[in-house]
Image (cartoon, rainbow, N blue to C red):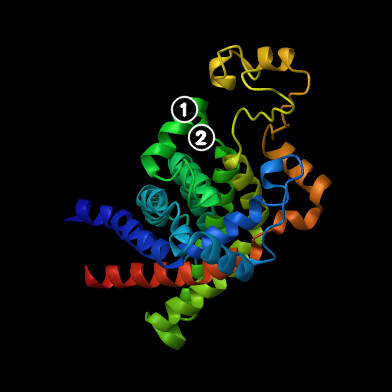
Amino acid sequence: MGEIRDWRPFVYGGVASITAEFGTFPIDTTKTRLQVQGQRIDQSHAELKYRGMTDAFVKITKQEGMKALYSGIWPAVLRQATYGTIKFGTYYTLKKVATEKGWLVDKSGNENVWCNAGCATVAGAVSSAIANPTDVLKVRMQVHGKGTNNAGLARCFKEIYVHEGVRGLWRGVGPTAQRAAVIAAVELPVYDFCKLHLMETFGDQVANHFISSFIASLGSAVASTPIDVIRTRLMNQRRVQLQVQNLGPGEAGGGGGRGVAGGGTVAAVAAAAPTTSAPKIYTGSLDCAIRTVRNEGFRALYKGFVPTWVRMGPWNIIFFITYEQLKQMY
């Protein structure tokens, strides 16, 4: 029975994560749209279409319908089934091991903050790296929304795999792991800390879980938003982007009007048409951060902060309440 119980945190974490994802996903979609807009080096997202979270929510609903707010929900659910399961299961398993080794809890019964944060960091980084392909699919589908060629999960996956290869599915894995590590390192220890110190006042009840999760969400939103902006932009960009101008029919490639796909390499197209331009893309996390600040200002790193925080609050509340109830039920 002990072995079965060791697996319970993984199952609880996955179920609670999926439940929270369904409840807060429209807010996440507005966050993603805000984060990718205003990129001067990417003409497809140079326009500032939304003034904020509420404006984005209203415009997406009016122009694309309510379903567009849930574009990417299935890769998000798949992500939580892997990421959420592994992260929370690993975190509480590491805490259990650290407690047995005498590293986490001192003689007075207080937890070591650094050891707690270390467990959370490892759990967050490992789980997010494993689940990165589902994150890429989610971001692509959220950005394009309704009426795109990436309308379905399978079609989006096939397009990325065919045109960008396996590496395309792990685009942005660096900042993804960093963001998850930061969120986990802040969120989980703060939640456990608040829950422990509020135990005398509220006991192990929903009120305690609610307050603790709300406090934990603020710190993680402040710490993770800049990394999240970089991650979203890296995941959304394609490996090769071309803007062909002033080319007559059939001139884009030597394949009888088939364009780039039928006309050979990008280099051949560029050589045949001097007016062809290949927009610069981000080469990595640092390059993305530098170009974002240089072109849009430091505040651009906090695009989508409000929906990030607004979403984290309800997400954490739904997650931790669900998680705690599952623990008490089984």
Residue 117 in the image: state x and y as whole percent.
54, 56
> Which residue shows up at 47% across the image and 54% down it?
103
- 159 over 182 or under it: above or below: above
> Which residue shows up at 68% across the image and 53% down it?
226
Q: In which quarter of the image is the C terminus?
A: bottom left
Whether residue 189 is visible here, answered yes or no, is no
Q: Is mark 2 on a helix, strand or loop?
A: loop
- 326 over 14 or under it: above or below: below
Which three-letter amino acid code belongs to the residue tagged 2?
Trp
Whether residue 117 is visible here, answered yes or no, is yes
Q: In which quarter of the image is the N terminus?
A: bottom left
Toward the bottom, the furthest residue is 201
Q: In the image, 181: left or right of 244?
A: left
> Which residue shows up at 45% across the image and 72% down it?
317
In front: 156, or 117? 156
- 263 over 306 or under it: above or below: above
| Figure disc tally | 2
The residue at which mark 1 appears reads as: 166
Residue 57 placement: quadrant = bottom right
In front: 155, or 204? 155
- Mark 2–mark 1 Cα distance, whole angstroms, equals 7 Å
Which three-letter amino acid code belongs to the residue tagged 1?
Val
Residue 46 in the image: state x and y as whole percent.
72, 47
In front: 283, or 16? 283
CB under 8 Å between discs 2 and 1:
yes
Density class for disc 1 (Cα within 10 Å; few <14, some 14-19, many ≥20) is: few
Density class for disc 2 (Cα within 10 Å; few <14, some 14-19, many ≥20) is: some
The residue at which mark 2 appears reads as: 170
